[in-house]
Image (cartoon, rainbow, N blue to C red):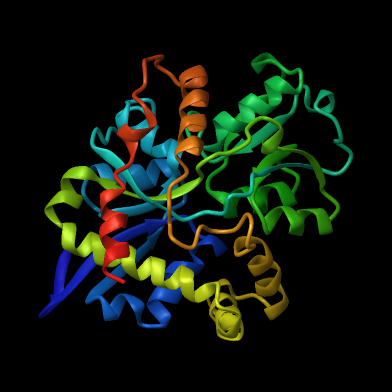
Amino acid sequence: MSTVAAGIRAVRLIVFPGGFNWPVWVAEDCGLFAQRAVRVEVTTTPGSVFQWTALAEGRADVAITLMDNVVAYREGQGAPGVLVPDAIALMAVDTRAMPTLMTTPGIETYAELQGKALAVDALVTGNALVLRGMLERGGLTSADYRLEQAGGVTQRFDAITRQQYAGSLFNAPLDAQLKAMGFHALDSASSLLSRFQGHVVAARRGWAEAHRAVVVDFLRALVDALEWLYVPANREKAFAIYSEHMQSAAKDAATAYSVLFDAANGFPANGEIDVEGIANVLELRAKYGEPRKTLSQASAYYDATYLAAAAAHG
């Protein structure tokens, strides 16, 4: 974090590109960060290894990342040589919907994935473990397929549309876009897990404790953005913000909104972390994570006090 002007605190945020950054865009474009005297410097990451290396080396302060990454890089089960022993989740920023295993046209069963390569962001973290669980449940062993590191969701989407891989996991609205292009929705991760904590705001605990006030203000601005996005009267402006940042048509914004801000399964408007969802993350990591080790309880990997303080600042 750096100070860019008197009273203004800069936070270096590293994110994957994609529509799930909508609350960040709203907080910036509608002046919600500025109202809290926060300036956010956003960097996009090509993958989780790059992202967590930046956090480990202090080149980023805060990340929007999968909850599994928080656990993996804290426990030494992430990319070799990258360790963030005080990694902590602070707030949920994801839908409550589960990702879909999308496959190329002509592949409609798990058996047809034998001998094929599937794309993941990273081989040992994130949704790779969800995919491994789904493939095992579908009757395949690790010898029946190959997982290949293809990068973040944008890179994986581009790769699968070129049919470089037989399949990959995608959240909405990308799964719907692939369906419209003739790709097959083979299965949903809901067949494996009832709940799963996806993306969260994460930081190093040491940094967060040293900058508690700005962390609370940063989270409050994101909660304000989520609340703003759920107000029907704001949809026209929200769609314009999405279209500008995604360089897409208004109809694409409407499709994304219908999923990301669905009343039942969209982003939690208060940013509350799903503790049961974290427990399921830990169950998968305990089964597939390497090196094998005993993990802590879910409560060890998140700190709800920052979000509680942000809520009190409303």
- Residue 173, given in percent of the width and then of the height, sits at 68, 59
Residue drawn at the location 51% of the way across and 18% of the way down: 287
- Residue 122, given in percent of the width and then of the height, sits at 50, 36
Looking at the image, can residue 18 be seen? no
Seen in the image, is 37 located left or right of residue 177?
left
Location of the C terminus by quadrant is bottom left
Residue drawn at the location 56% of the way across and 85% of the way down: 237
Seen in the image, is 84 located left or right of residue 290?
left
From this viewpoint, which residue is outermost toward the right? 106
Looking at the image, can residue 59 be seen? yes
Q: Tell me: residue 200, above or below residue 1.
A: above
Residue drawn at the location 58% of the way across and 50% of the way down: 96
Location of the N terminus by quadrant is bottom left
Seen in the image, is 314 located left or right of residue 121?
left
Determine which quarter of the picture holds residue 240: bottom right
| Count of numbered tags | 0
Seen in the image, is 24 located left or right of residue 252?
left
Q: Tell me: residue 77, above or below residue 159.
A: above
- Residue 193, given in percent of the width and then of the height, sits at 63, 32
- Residue 10, given in percent of the width and then of the height, sits at 21, 68
